[in-house]
Image (spheres, rainbow, N blue to C red):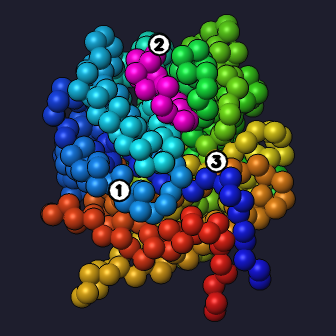
Amino acid sequence: MTDHVFPESFVWGSATAAYQIEGAATEDGRGPSIWDTYSHTPGRTLNGDTGDVAADHYHRWPEDLGHIADLGLGAYRFSISWPRVQPGGAGPFNRAGLDFYSRLVDGLLERGVRPVATMYHWDLPQEREDAGGWASRDTALRFEEYAAGIVGALGDRVHTWTTLNEPWCSAYLGYASGVHAPGRTEPAAALAAVHHLNLAHGLAGRVVRELAPAAELSVTLNLHVVRPASDSAADHDAVRRIDALANRAFLGPMLDGAYPADLLADTAAVTDWSFVRDGDEKLIAVPLDVLGVNYYSSTLVRAWDGVSPRSDADGHGKSTATPWVAADDVDFLPQPGPYTAMGWNIDPAAFTELLLRLHHDHPGQPLMITENGAAFDDVVSADGTIQDDRRIDYLRRHIAAVAEARAQGADVRGYFVWSLLDNFEWGYGYDRRFGIIRVDYDTQVRTWKQSAHWYKQLAATGRLEQPTS
């Protein structure tokens, strides 16, 4: 096999999220988010972990930007904490919060790194949830005001604005299965949240177009590669139904300006979708400069036979409720290993498949890999080094999958490794480590894993070398 060589224009970056790394949960006027409330609720997170301190990035950001510069990365994707800059999710903005992100953006620019700012990475202000959360249309309207505030403050310096991160998780894991904040298990509310998140994207995207016309506009979706367990018509229909919930519920309105008819029909017993008002779908379909793609593993489904024990191996956390609204008769099957520490199967070929699907279904739409990476049980050697060969292998194989998609015509313009730092991994607390830089949570000392050194070399050369054995 020959090495893959990426062009100089290809962007190499890393990604993080505010609640997962910042800490300083009650400092400088920050208000509570749904993840503060959720993580402080007994039994919600592993070991009762919270993001109160996390990786203490709020105080250590100059050091962390130094690591980004030393890695030689061209871009850094971070998220802005809505409750840090607008504590109640409505009304006055918090100058201290805006100043923090202003310093962060300036620090990136001083180091020659493109700032890629995500407006929403799951930390809804608790006051907004108390008023109905994403199940309420008003939250989308308040998000438009929030977007205007942060774009007005930072828009002339941010290279790329990403409206939402993984609205699938916000809607279905937050409001249907309850394994993410706010922890609700209300299928109709989950579908309302799907729409109001989509609407928030469209409204905020139009704010970017108006206030920062030179900036690029993006959204990040965790798109699912769903395969049938057999070639039966029933299993293929199971794929169609899950694809509608997982992918086309967002791709349809965002890129095509309409919800897919089969999604509306499949979920008609749950909701009549009357929360979609005339003109909403047109508002949602704001043209994107780049579509962000997050990928970690693939999904295998079959039609439940109504007799066999149900299988719910979808990789999205255990709950008595399902995130898959109106799909109770679909089984999610375990897949062959190897697996990451999250229990997710490793399937680089599905990554290529996903990117080529997007290329064929939405020709001309530029793509960016905004998250890809793996959690493993890293071991710190006696000399302090962390030889994370499994993570390097995962990254190499998935970046090769990106190269293969590019070779077949997919317009993939960059890759952001998840994550720069070990962090608070939502319901899994601090037990799962995705970072290429280790964080000692007792001392907050940062240590480059071998994967960081490997990624630095890749970013410098653009050459993905094939393994020697």
Find the distance from the CA under tag 3 to the CA under tag 2: 27 Å
The three-letter amino acid code for the residue at tag 1 is Gly
Residue pointed to by mark 3: 368
Please state which amino acid type lies under the numbered disc 2. Answer: Leu
Number of labels in the image equals 3
Label 3 or label 2, whichever lies nearer to me, is: 3
Label 3 – label 1 distance at C-alpha? 24 Å
- Relative to 381, does residue 320 appear above or below in the rendering? above
Residue 141's label in the rendered image is 2
Task: Locate the N terminus and report the quarter of the image it occupies.
Answer: bottom right
Which picture quadrant has residue 363? top right
Q: Quadrant of the C terminus?
A: bottom right
Badge number at residue 242: none
Q: Which of marks 1 and 2 is nearer the N terminus?
A: 1
The reply to whether callout 3 and callout 2 are in contact (CB within 8 Å) is: no
On the image, the x and y values in percent for residue 152 come to 44, 18
Residue at image x 48%, y 41%? 115
- Rendered image: mark on residue 66: 1
Give the residues drawn in magenta, as a range. Answer: 148-170
Depth order, front residue of 29/130: 29
Does residue 314 appear in this view? Answer: no
